[in-house]
Amino acid sequence: MSDGDYVVEAEALSKRFGKRWAVRELDLAIARGAVCGLLGPNGAGKSTTLRMLLGLVRPTHGAVRLFGASLRDARLHVLKRVGCLIEAPAFYPHLSGRKNLELLGRISGGVDAARVQACLERVGLGDRGEDRTAGYSTGMKQRLGLAAAILHDPEFVLLDEPLNGLDPPAVLLVRRLIRSLAEEEGKTVLVSSHMLHEVEVTCDHVVLLRGGRKVVDGKVAELIKPDHARLELRVNDGEAALGWLRAQAGVGEVEEEERGPDGSASLVVSLAGAESAQLNRGLIEAGVEVSSLAPRRRSLEDLFAELTAEPAAVGAEEEGA
Amino acid sequence: MIGRLWTLYRVELSKLLARRLLWVGAVLVILLALAGPSLSGAAAAARAAAEGSAGGDEFQNGWTVLAGSVTRASFLIWLLAVVLSASSVAEEASWGTLRVICARPVRRAEWIAAKVLALWSLTAAILLAAVFAATASAELAFGLYDVVDPLFPDRVTHSFGDMRWFVLAATGASLVPLLALIGVGTFCSTLVDHPGHATGAAVGALVLLSAAGGLSPGFGEYSFVDQLFVPFRLVNDLANQYTGKLREFNEDLPRVVWVSGLWAIAGTQLAALRLTLRDVV
Ligand SMILES: Nc1ncnc2c1ncn2[C@@H]1O[C@H](COP(=O)(O)OP(=O)(O)OP(=O)(O)O)[C@@H](O)[C@H]1O
Ligand SMILES: [Mg+2]
């Protein structure tokens, strides 16, 4: 079957809830085999976008094509090839984790007991499959939700904030799972997140959303590179460090992010010609202890500010706004 | 389509079979049906005491006891059907599984049909078990014989074979209002995303329909709520020697089937339509 090069194609996708536009004029194209991040602050419209891609929510305008086929016309057919975890994972509380997966597997078709077990093991629930899901912890539910998403071996996996409620080992497990889905199994993955760093480490491609609109989309390597022109410093004596840094010629703006009760501080320094090693030596010679010094990791807010030169607002815009 | 429906039906069946409420309900229904003769005996004794007459009800026989037992047990079955159908979709919405199911390759209308059919088959099985239990206990306590005129014991009003046919026909006909109840309950379930509220809405709707049927008998003939009671009331009347009831039985039973059948189709269709048109968030 010729499906085209894009797993997802959406044109001018818009959704309005009452007077509020949750998503507006969103164009989206996700290439086969890509790991794409949908990045945006709370209320940016990430979940609404994913729901429209699955046909859960009817777009107010625009249309979605999955595997080259219209979602409206071929929903049953294309959804067989899609797996998802939307918002919080949900299960039948009175059934065991295994039974939940078995039922979902029957609906999707082509899932046997061995596959259910393999998926449980892949998310680290191999020995808790018999327990009722009502007794699962948040992280266990999230893991079971991931197992359900990959259960029927879908070609396209949508994950909405898959790291919610996970402990550090589980975060690593999910990152590895996402990478292996794409690299070893050739699947296409769309992950939503409000954490820049997550997208940076798992995705190749990123779409930035804010207020329901796409701000930019492009390759992660090009959009989210660490900012070598800004340094983050942790020093034991904020006052002295500020004084010394502000007197240096190669240093631009210096901001104090945080001051501890003992006088220690976190500073953000914009470099204007100076080298980080040079600043480090200078500070020590001026009697300031530097406990850490690293290129500034950009936050989502920073990125938005850079890209649009305006502060990010939470929520969607009102009708007519 | 049949294949998909069959798969969904089996999934819904296993979900229901894991519900404790269903099993508790089934046990209570069967106990109630088995206890029929003692309950009927007590009722008859109370009536006799109130009327100041000595003996029991001379018209009471195995068949009237059977009909009474089934009617009592049916109340519980309807209650079970209303609670389970009215919470069926609302419950999934509140758990979030509605989203999970709708994001799978499932046609929402087929899913609703599977839900209605699964709940119907289980409550129908409970009804059949109740009829069986009521028959067994009536047979043991009173015996099931030809119905005879108490004044002329050799005059047979309805033979054993006739009565058996009436009971079978009434049982079959009762299944249709049960389906209507489930269809309408499921429709209520698609209106509210909270199982408790949806159950409240369904009970409210039934009370309104039944009140409307009480105020206007003409409407009652076309309301499945009124039809719920009809089949076994007719069996009881027949066993009670009202010979004129035979014509009524032959006329009313088919109406129970088609009126309730239309309600069942309407309820299920509306539920499917409502779920298909809404956003699942
Ligand atoms: N069912 C709904 N009814 C009304 N408004 C809604 C509904 N779902 C979403 N919205 C609105 O649409 C906007 C986008 O919501 P959405 O859930 O898509 O955001 P999100 O990017 O997933 O946010 P988060 O990071 O908090 O999950 C919000 O303003 C929200 O209030
Ligand atoms: Mg969200």
Image (spheres, grey):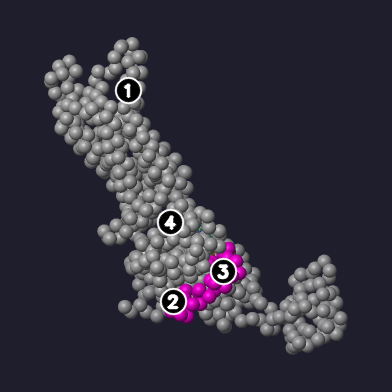
Same-subunit check for callouts 2 and 4: no
Q: Secondary structure at mark 2?
A: loop
Q: Residue at x 22, y 23 (%)?
A: B240
Q: Nearer the viewer, mark 2 or mark 1?
A: 1
Residue B213: x and y, percent? 32, 32
Image quarter of the C terminus of chain A? bottom right
Q: Is residue A279 above or below residue A210?
A: below
Secondary structure at badge 4 equals helix
- Label pair 1/3, CB-CB below 8 angstroms: no
Disc 3 element: helix
Residue at the image point whose x is 52% and y is 61% from the top: A141
Please report the bounds of the magenta region as a residue range.
A160-189
* Mark 1: C-beta under 8 Å from nearest atom of ligand 1: no
In this view, the mark in front (4 or 1): 1
How far apart are the alpha carbons under marks 4 and 1?
48 Å
Frontmost residue, A242 versus A91: A91
Up/down of A49 relative to B124, above or below:
below
Q: Is any atom of residue A25 visible in this view?
A: no
- Report the quarter where the N terminus of chain A lies: bottom left
- Among the 4 quarters of the image, the one containing residue B70: top left
Discs 2/3, front: 3
The residue under label 3 is: A170
Q: Amino acid at mark 3?
A: Ala
**Which is more N-terminal, label 3 or label 2?**
3
